[in-house]
Image: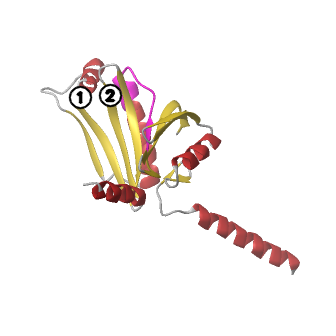
Amino acid sequence: MTKIILLFLAYLAFLSAAYSQSSEHLVFKGVPLDGTLSEYVSKMEQDGFTNQGTENGTAVLSGEFAGYKDCIVGVSTLKQKDLVYKIAVTFPKKDTWSALSGNYFDLKDMLAEKYGSASQVVEKFDSSSPPRDDSTRMFNVKFDNCKYFSLWKTDKGEIHLSIQHESVTRCYVLLSYSDKINSSIIKTKAKSDL
């Protein structure tokens, strides 16, 4: 009888722990996008990220994410309201289209496995003629003629994957998570300023 009671108590403890892990918020690396910036950064540091500092309500961390090393993670809040609502992951820069698009499609496949089909996908080049080789595709990325993004809309928020560039020197994949509840709070706060 004692064993049954102990098993039952263990089961209740397991359910309680599982319930407390579930969240109404979008989750990044197992942590809900909620709470203050310092609380969230502390949780990311516990997960192996290195804090690079905070500026204008955004903490910058570095570390490994989804099997990719040397990622930069930005954790954003509204300065007037210390509430985490958005996270962006910048993957390492790539110098060739095959490497850049390889990252994009690899991450897109993993996100599709986890969240299902994307709600919206645009994958095209805005150039007079379709690029036919790697260097022409990279030229189009660097000069803002590449529109590659996938968007997942979930009950808890949005996940946006895209190919980006920083002037003509840096091309990379960007992945962002935007929590629905806290984004709404931030938007309401912003509207009150109008």
Going from the N terminus, do you reach mark 1 or mark 2 first? 1
Q: Which mark is residue 144?
A: 1
Spatial CA distance of label 1 from label 2 is 8 Å
Q: Which residue is mark 2?
A: 165
Which residue is found at the position 46% from the left and 45% from the top?
110
Nearest the viewer among 58 and 140 is 58
Residue farthest to the bottom?
1
Query: Where is 5 relative to 37, above or below?
Result: below
Magenta segment, which residues? 87-101
Q: Amino acid at mark 2?
A: His
Q: Position of residue 126 (x, y in %)?
A: 17, 32
Asked whether disc 1 touches disc 2, contact meaning CB atoms under 8 Å apart, the reply is yes
Q: Give the amino acid at mark 1.
A: Asp
Q: Residue at x 29, y 23 (%)?
A: 167
Which of these two is toward me, 175 or 191? 191
Q: Image height check: is 175 above or below 22?
A: above
Q: Secondary structure at mark 2?
A: strand
Using the image as rendered, state which of residue 126 and residue 57 is in the foreground.
57
Establish if 172 lies above or below 34.
Answer: above
- Give the residue displayed 42% in from the left and 33% down from the top: 103
* Quarter of the image with the C terminus in it: bottom left
Residue 132 position within the rendered picture, expressed as x and y whole percent measured from the top left: 23, 23
- Residue 94: x and y in percent read 40, 23
